[in-house]
Amino acid sequence: MIPEQIKNLVKSGHAAPSADNTQPWLFVWDGEALYIRYDAKRVQGTTFPPESQATFLAVGGVIENISQAASFADIALDINIPDTISTDLSEPYVKISFLDTQESNTDIHQHPLFQRHTNRFKYRKTPLPSDIKHTLTTMTEGNAHIKIFEQKTSIKKIASVALAASKVRFQTQEVHEWLAKSLRFTDHSVKKADGLDVRTLDLPPGGRQFLHFISDWNRIQPLNKLGIYNLLALIDSRPLRQAPAIVSIISSTDPRSSLNAGRLLARAWTHLNSLGIAVHPYYVVSDQLNRLNKNLVPEKLTGQVENLKYQCENLFNLEAGEALHMLLRIGYPTRTPPRSLRLPFERVFTDLTND
Protein backbone atom coordinates (compact mmCIF):
# COMPACT_ATOMS: atom_id res chain seq x y z
CA MET A 1 0.00 0.00 0.00
CA ILE A 2 1.24 3.50 -0.86
CA PRO A 3 1.81 5.59 2.29
CA GLU A 4 -0.69 8.44 2.50
CA GLN A 5 2.03 11.05 2.92
CA ILE A 6 3.62 9.88 -0.35
CA LYS A 7 0.28 10.30 -2.13
CA ASN A 8 -0.11 13.78 -0.69
CA LEU A 9 3.38 14.86 -1.67
CA VAL A 10 2.84 13.54 -5.19
CA LYS A 11 -0.39 15.54 -5.37
CA SER A 12 1.58 18.59 -4.25
CA GLY A 13 4.11 18.09 -7.03
CA HIS A 14 1.33 17.40 -9.50
CA ALA A 15 -0.11 20.88 -8.79
CA ALA A 16 2.97 22.53 -10.34
CA PRO A 17 2.70 24.67 -13.49
CA SER A 18 3.70 23.31 -16.90
CA ALA A 19 3.71 24.57 -20.48
CA ASP A 20 0.11 24.58 -21.79
CA ASN A 21 -0.83 22.44 -18.77
CA THR A 22 0.70 19.35 -20.40
CA GLN A 23 1.87 17.92 -17.05
CA PRO A 24 4.86 16.06 -18.57
CA TRP A 25 5.94 14.38 -15.34
CA LEU A 26 5.71 10.83 -14.07
CA PHE A 27 6.13 10.01 -10.37
CA VAL A 28 7.66 6.59 -9.66
CA TRP A 29 7.61 5.03 -6.18
CA ASP A 30 9.81 2.00 -5.41
CA GLY A 31 8.89 1.63 -1.75
CA GLU A 32 11.87 3.65 -0.52
CA ALA A 33 12.20 6.70 -2.73
CA LEU A 34 10.16 8.83 -5.12
CA TYR A 35 11.54 9.53 -8.61
CA ILE A 36 10.43 12.17 -11.09
CA ARG A 37 10.66 11.21 -14.75
CA TYR A 38 9.47 12.45 -18.12
CA ASP A 39 6.30 10.63 -19.18
CA ALA A 40 7.34 9.91 -22.76
CA LYS A 41 4.56 7.42 -23.34
CA ARG A 42 1.92 10.06 -22.64
CA VAL A 43 3.38 13.35 -23.86
CA GLN A 44 6.32 12.82 -26.22
CA GLY A 45 5.69 14.51 -29.55
CA THR A 46 2.87 16.65 -28.20
CA THR A 47 4.89 19.13 -26.12
CA PHE A 48 8.44 20.10 -25.24
CA PRO A 49 10.97 17.23 -25.21
CA PRO A 50 12.60 15.90 -22.02
CA GLU A 51 15.80 17.94 -22.40
CA SER A 52 14.08 21.28 -23.01
CA GLN A 53 14.20 24.33 -20.76
CA ALA A 54 10.39 24.30 -20.50
CA THR A 55 10.45 20.73 -19.17
CA PHE A 56 13.17 21.56 -16.64
CA LEU A 57 11.08 24.52 -15.48
CA ALA A 58 8.09 22.23 -14.96
CA VAL A 59 10.12 19.62 -13.07
CA GLY A 60 11.68 22.38 -10.96
CA GLY A 61 8.17 23.46 -10.02
CA VAL A 62 7.35 19.89 -9.00
CA ILE A 63 10.44 19.76 -6.78
CA GLU A 64 9.57 23.11 -5.20
CA ASN A 65 5.98 22.09 -4.47
CA ILE A 66 7.05 18.83 -2.86
CA SER A 67 9.69 20.64 -0.82
CA GLN A 68 7.20 23.27 0.36
CA ALA A 69 4.53 20.70 1.20
CA ALA A 70 7.02 18.55 3.12
CA SER A 71 8.22 21.55 5.12
CA PHE A 72 4.60 22.53 5.81
CA ALA A 73 3.86 19.04 7.16
CA ASP A 74 7.24 18.69 8.92
CA ILE A 75 8.31 15.77 6.72
CA ALA A 76 12.09 15.37 6.37
CA LEU A 77 13.29 14.87 2.79
CA ASP A 78 16.54 14.34 0.96
CA ILE A 79 16.23 15.77 -2.57
CA ASN A 80 18.98 14.28 -4.72
CA ILE A 81 19.52 15.95 -8.10
CA PRO A 82 22.35 14.28 -10.06
CA ASP A 83 25.47 16.36 -10.78
CA THR A 84 24.85 15.63 -14.44
CA ILE A 85 21.15 15.75 -15.15
CA SER A 86 20.06 13.29 -17.81
CA THR A 87 18.87 14.96 -20.99
CA ASP A 88 17.28 11.79 -22.34
CA LEU A 89 14.90 9.24 -20.87
CA SER A 90 17.48 6.93 -19.29
CA GLU A 91 17.53 8.46 -15.81
CA PRO A 92 15.08 10.33 -13.55
CA TYR A 93 15.49 14.05 -13.04
CA VAL A 94 15.50 13.70 -9.28
CA LYS A 95 15.35 11.15 -6.47
CA ILE A 96 13.51 12.08 -3.27
CA SER A 97 14.22 9.99 -0.19
CA PHE A 98 12.24 10.20 3.04
CA LEU A 99 14.22 10.57 6.25
CA ASP A 100 11.16 10.28 8.46
CA THR A 101 8.64 7.54 7.71
CA GLN A 102 6.18 8.62 10.40
CA GLU A 103 2.87 9.81 8.97
CA SER A 104 2.15 13.52 9.34
CA ASN A 105 -1.15 14.71 10.78
CA THR A 106 -0.95 18.01 8.88
CA ASP A 107 -3.42 18.48 6.03
CA ILE A 108 -1.02 19.28 3.17
CA HIS A 109 -3.95 20.42 1.02
CA GLN A 110 -4.21 23.55 3.18
CA HIS A 111 -0.93 24.79 1.71
CA PRO A 112 -1.30 27.81 -0.65
CA LEU A 113 0.37 25.88 -3.50
CA PHE A 114 -2.97 24.19 -4.16
CA GLN A 115 -4.49 27.62 -4.82
CA ARG A 116 -1.83 28.66 -7.35
CA HIS A 117 -3.41 29.37 -10.73
CA THR A 118 -3.14 31.37 -13.95
CA ASN A 119 -5.21 34.48 -14.57
CA ARG A 120 -5.10 35.69 -18.20
CA PHE A 121 -7.87 38.27 -17.75
CA LYS A 122 -7.62 42.02 -17.17
CA TYR A 123 -5.88 43.38 -14.07
CA ARG A 124 -6.47 46.56 -12.10
CA LYS A 125 -3.92 49.34 -12.49
CA THR A 126 -3.21 49.39 -8.74
CA PRO A 127 0.57 49.43 -8.10
CA LEU A 128 2.05 46.63 -6.04
CA PRO A 129 3.12 47.44 -2.46
CA SER A 130 6.86 47.95 -2.02
CA ASP A 131 7.19 45.17 0.57
CA ILE A 132 5.85 42.60 -1.91
CA LYS A 133 8.30 43.75 -4.57
CA HIS A 134 11.14 43.59 -2.05
CA THR A 135 10.21 40.03 -1.06
CA LEU A 136 10.18 38.94 -4.71
CA THR A 137 13.53 40.47 -5.59
CA THR A 138 15.19 38.81 -2.59
CA MET A 139 13.95 35.35 -3.62
CA THR A 140 16.68 33.19 -5.18
CA GLU A 141 17.39 29.55 -5.91
CA GLY A 142 20.99 28.79 -6.85
CA ASN A 143 21.83 31.50 -9.37
CA ALA A 144 18.18 31.94 -10.40
CA HIS A 145 16.87 35.37 -9.49
CA ILE A 146 14.05 37.84 -10.12
CA LYS A 147 13.88 41.29 -11.65
CA ILE A 148 10.73 43.41 -11.55
CA PHE A 149 9.74 46.04 -14.11
CA GLU A 150 7.16 48.73 -13.36
CA GLN A 151 8.14 51.73 -15.45
CA LYS A 152 5.91 52.21 -18.49
CA THR A 153 8.88 52.51 -20.83
CA SER A 154 10.34 49.18 -19.65
CA ILE A 155 6.96 47.45 -19.82
CA LYS A 156 6.44 48.67 -23.39
CA LYS A 157 9.87 47.37 -24.38
CA ILE A 158 9.14 43.96 -22.84
CA ALA A 159 5.75 43.86 -24.58
CA SER A 160 7.52 44.66 -27.85
CA VAL A 161 9.92 41.72 -27.56
CA ALA A 162 6.97 39.47 -26.67
CA LEU A 163 5.17 40.78 -29.76
CA ALA A 164 8.18 39.96 -31.94
CA ALA A 165 8.53 36.49 -30.43
CA SER A 166 4.83 35.79 -30.85
CA LYS A 167 4.98 36.73 -34.53
CA VAL A 168 7.63 34.08 -35.02
CA ARG A 169 5.65 31.52 -33.02
CA PHE A 170 2.54 31.86 -35.17
CA GLN A 171 4.71 31.25 -38.25
CA THR A 172 6.39 28.13 -36.84
CA GLN A 173 4.58 24.89 -37.66
CA GLU A 174 5.89 22.71 -34.82
CA VAL A 175 5.10 25.23 -32.08
CA HIS A 176 1.69 26.03 -33.57
CA GLU A 177 0.77 22.35 -33.73
CA TRP A 178 1.82 21.79 -30.12
CA LEU A 179 -0.45 24.63 -29.05
CA ALA A 180 -3.30 23.29 -31.17
CA LYS A 181 -2.99 19.84 -29.58
CA SER A 182 -3.22 21.38 -26.11
CA LEU A 183 -6.38 23.43 -26.71
CA ARG A 184 -9.63 22.12 -25.19
CA PHE A 185 -12.74 23.59 -26.82
CA THR A 186 -15.53 21.34 -25.52
CA ASP A 187 -16.72 20.15 -22.12
CA HIS A 188 -15.82 16.62 -23.16
CA SER A 189 -12.23 17.55 -24.08
CA VAL A 190 -11.84 19.63 -20.90
CA LYS A 191 -12.64 16.50 -18.89
CA LYS A 192 -9.39 14.98 -20.19
CA ALA A 193 -7.89 17.17 -17.42
CA ASP A 194 -4.84 18.32 -19.34
CA GLY A 195 -4.17 21.04 -21.88
CA LEU A 196 -5.66 24.52 -22.07
CA ASP A 197 -9.36 25.00 -21.45
CA VAL A 198 -10.14 27.90 -23.82
CA ARG A 199 -12.38 29.35 -21.11
CA THR A 200 -9.17 30.28 -19.27
CA LEU A 201 -8.15 32.51 -22.21
CA ASP A 202 -9.29 36.13 -22.38
CA LEU A 203 -10.58 35.90 -25.94
CA PRO A 204 -12.47 38.70 -27.72
CA PRO A 205 -15.99 38.04 -29.09
CA GLY A 206 -15.75 35.34 -31.74
CA GLY A 207 -12.22 34.52 -30.59
CA ARG A 208 -13.07 30.98 -29.55
CA GLN A 209 -14.40 30.10 -32.99
CA PHE A 210 -11.52 31.84 -34.76
CA LEU A 211 -8.94 30.10 -32.57
CA HIS A 212 -10.53 26.75 -33.39
CA PHE A 213 -10.40 27.59 -37.09
CA ILE A 214 -6.72 28.59 -37.16
CA SER A 215 -5.60 25.73 -34.91
CA ASP A 216 -5.16 23.72 -38.13
CA TRP A 217 -1.78 24.62 -39.65
CA ASN A 218 -3.15 24.10 -43.16
CA ARG A 219 -5.67 26.86 -42.51
CA ILE A 220 -3.40 29.38 -40.84
CA GLN A 221 -0.62 29.01 -43.43
CA PRO A 222 -2.41 30.86 -46.25
CA LEU A 223 -3.67 33.45 -43.75
CA ASN A 224 -0.09 34.04 -42.61
CA LYS A 225 0.76 35.05 -46.17
CA LEU A 226 -1.76 37.85 -45.65
CA GLY A 227 -0.09 38.79 -42.34
CA ILE A 228 -2.61 37.31 -39.88
CA TYR A 229 0.27 36.44 -37.54
CA ASN A 230 0.69 40.17 -36.87
CA LEU A 231 -2.85 40.42 -35.51
CA LEU A 232 -2.54 37.21 -33.48
CA ALA A 233 0.75 38.35 -31.95
CA LEU A 234 -0.73 41.75 -31.12
CA ILE A 235 -3.66 40.13 -29.28
CA ASP A 236 -1.30 37.75 -27.49
CA SER A 237 1.11 40.44 -26.26
CA ARG A 238 -1.36 43.24 -25.49
CA PRO A 239 -1.94 42.17 -21.84
CA LEU A 240 1.79 42.57 -21.18
CA ARG A 241 1.73 46.12 -22.52
CA GLN A 242 -1.08 46.92 -20.05
CA ALA A 243 0.55 45.13 -17.09
CA PRO A 244 0.94 46.97 -13.75
CA ALA A 245 4.23 45.08 -13.34
CA ILE A 246 6.26 42.34 -15.01
CA VAL A 247 8.45 39.77 -13.27
CA SER A 248 11.39 38.21 -15.11
CA ILE A 249 13.04 35.01 -13.93
CA ILE A 250 16.67 34.77 -14.97
CA SER A 251 19.17 31.97 -14.51
CA SER A 252 22.08 30.23 -16.22
CA THR A 253 21.33 27.99 -19.18
CA ASP A 254 22.48 24.59 -17.86
CA PRO A 255 19.82 22.02 -16.83
CA ARG A 256 20.35 22.38 -13.07
CA SER A 257 19.98 26.16 -13.31
CA SER A 258 16.77 25.72 -15.30
CA LEU A 259 15.48 23.41 -12.55
CA ASN A 260 16.37 26.15 -10.06
CA ALA A 261 14.50 28.68 -12.18
CA GLY A 262 11.47 26.37 -12.13
CA ARG A 263 11.66 26.17 -8.35
CA LEU A 264 11.87 29.94 -8.08
CA LEU A 265 8.99 30.35 -10.53
CA ALA A 266 6.67 28.10 -8.51
CA ARG A 267 7.72 29.75 -5.23
CA ALA A 268 7.14 33.31 -6.44
CA TRP A 269 3.87 32.39 -8.20
CA THR A 270 2.46 30.65 -5.12
CA HIS A 271 3.49 33.57 -2.91
CA LEU A 272 1.82 36.12 -5.19
CA ASN A 273 -1.42 34.16 -5.48
CA SER A 274 -1.52 33.71 -1.70
CA LEU A 275 -1.56 37.53 -1.43
CA GLY A 276 -4.41 37.87 -3.91
CA ILE A 277 -2.14 38.95 -6.77
CA ALA A 278 -2.86 37.47 -10.20
CA VAL A 279 -0.17 35.88 -12.37
CA HIS A 280 -0.06 35.32 -16.13
CA PRO A 281 3.04 33.49 -17.45
CA TYR A 282 4.62 34.33 -20.81
CA TYR A 283 7.14 31.79 -22.11
CA VAL A 284 7.07 32.83 -25.77
CA VAL A 285 10.25 34.96 -25.62
CA SER A 286 12.31 32.34 -23.79
CA ASP A 287 11.00 29.65 -26.13
CA GLN A 288 12.15 31.44 -29.27
CA LEU A 289 15.57 32.18 -27.79
CA ASN A 290 15.99 28.50 -26.91
CA ARG A 291 14.89 27.43 -30.35
CA LEU A 292 17.48 29.80 -31.81
CA ASN A 293 20.23 28.20 -29.70
CA LYS A 294 19.19 24.78 -30.97
CA ASN A 295 18.87 25.88 -34.61
CA LEU A 296 15.14 25.16 -34.62
CA VAL A 297 13.95 28.57 -35.84
CA PRO A 298 12.82 28.52 -39.50
CA GLU A 299 15.62 29.97 -41.63
CA LYS A 300 13.54 32.88 -42.94
CA LEU A 301 12.79 33.94 -39.33
CA THR A 302 16.25 33.47 -37.82
CA GLY A 303 17.24 37.11 -38.26
CA GLN A 304 14.21 38.26 -36.31
CA VAL A 305 15.05 36.01 -33.36
CA GLU A 306 18.72 37.00 -33.44
CA ASN A 307 17.57 40.62 -33.10
CA LEU A 308 15.25 39.51 -30.29
CA LYS A 309 18.21 37.94 -28.49
CA TYR A 310 20.18 41.17 -28.73
CA GLN A 311 17.27 43.19 -27.34
CA CYS A 312 16.77 40.80 -24.41
CA GLU A 313 20.44 40.82 -23.45
CA ASN A 314 20.22 44.59 -23.06
CA LEU A 315 16.71 44.86 -21.68
CA PHE A 316 17.24 42.28 -18.91
CA ASN A 317 20.95 43.04 -18.39
CA LEU A 318 21.85 39.42 -18.96
CA GLU A 319 25.36 38.38 -18.05
CA ALA A 320 27.38 35.83 -20.02
CA GLY A 321 25.78 32.41 -19.68
CA GLU A 322 22.48 33.79 -18.38
CA ALA A 323 19.08 33.45 -20.02
CA LEU A 324 15.56 34.71 -19.55
CA HIS A 325 13.50 31.73 -18.35
CA MET A 326 10.06 33.26 -17.85
CA LEU A 327 8.05 36.47 -17.85
CA LEU A 328 5.11 36.94 -15.51
CA ARG A 329 2.45 39.61 -15.89
CA ILE A 330 1.31 40.39 -12.35
CA GLY A 331 -1.34 42.61 -10.77
CA TYR A 332 -4.58 42.67 -8.84
CA PRO A 333 -7.32 40.75 -10.68
CA THR A 334 -10.67 42.06 -11.88
CA ARG A 335 -12.27 38.61 -11.91
CA THR A 336 -11.79 35.05 -10.71
CA PRO A 337 -10.67 32.87 -13.63
CA PRO A 338 -11.64 29.26 -14.37
CA ARG A 339 -9.02 26.82 -13.10
CA SER A 340 -7.21 24.29 -15.27
CA LEU A 341 -7.69 20.68 -14.24
CA ARG A 342 -5.12 18.04 -13.34
CA LEU A 343 -4.89 14.48 -14.59
CA PRO A 344 -6.04 11.81 -12.14
CA PHE A 345 -3.40 10.62 -9.69
CA GLU A 346 -3.27 7.20 -11.35
CA ARG A 347 -2.27 8.73 -14.71
CA VAL A 348 0.90 10.32 -13.35
CA PHE A 349 1.96 7.78 -10.71
CA THR A 350 3.62 4.37 -10.97
CA ASP A 351 3.98 2.11 -7.94
CA LEU A 352 6.81 -0.38 -8.53
CA THR A 353 5.99 -2.23 -5.33
CA ASN A 354 2.95 -3.70 -7.11
CA ASP A 355 5.08 -5.30 -9.84
Image (spheres, rainbow, N blue to C red):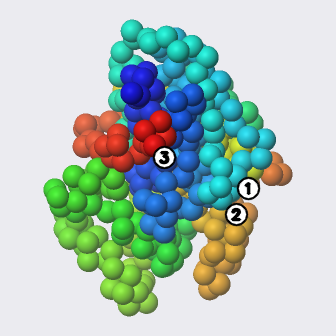
Check residue 313 in the rendering and tell me which mark sits there, or answer none: 1
**Looking at the rendering, which quadrant does residue 339 occupy?**
top left
Q: How far apart are the two marked residues, 3 and 2, measured between alpha carbons? A: 33 Å
Q: Amino acid at mark 2?
A: Lys
Residue that numbered label 2 is attached to = 309
Question: Is residue 241 visible to us here?
Answer: no
Outermost residue to the front: 355
Nearest the viewer among 334 and 82 is: 82
223 lies above or below 349: below
Helix or strand or loop: what does disc 1 sit on? helix
- Labels 3 and 2: the sequence-earlier one: 3
* Residue at numbered disc 3: 26
- Give the residue at x 17% y 58%: 188
Residue 160 lies, with reference to residue 253, above or below; the image says below
- The answer to whether 337 appears left or right of 322 in the picture is left
Residue type at mark 1: give it.
Glu
Disc 2 and disc 1 in contact, CB within 8 angstroms: yes
Q: Residue 115 placed where, x, y %?
A: 35, 29
Mark 3 and 2 residues: CB-CB less than 8 Å, in contact? no
In the image, 168 versus 353, the foreground residue is 353
Q: Please rate how many residues cluster around mark 1, counting C-alpha atoms within 10 Å: few if below 14, some from 14 to 19, many from 20.
A: some
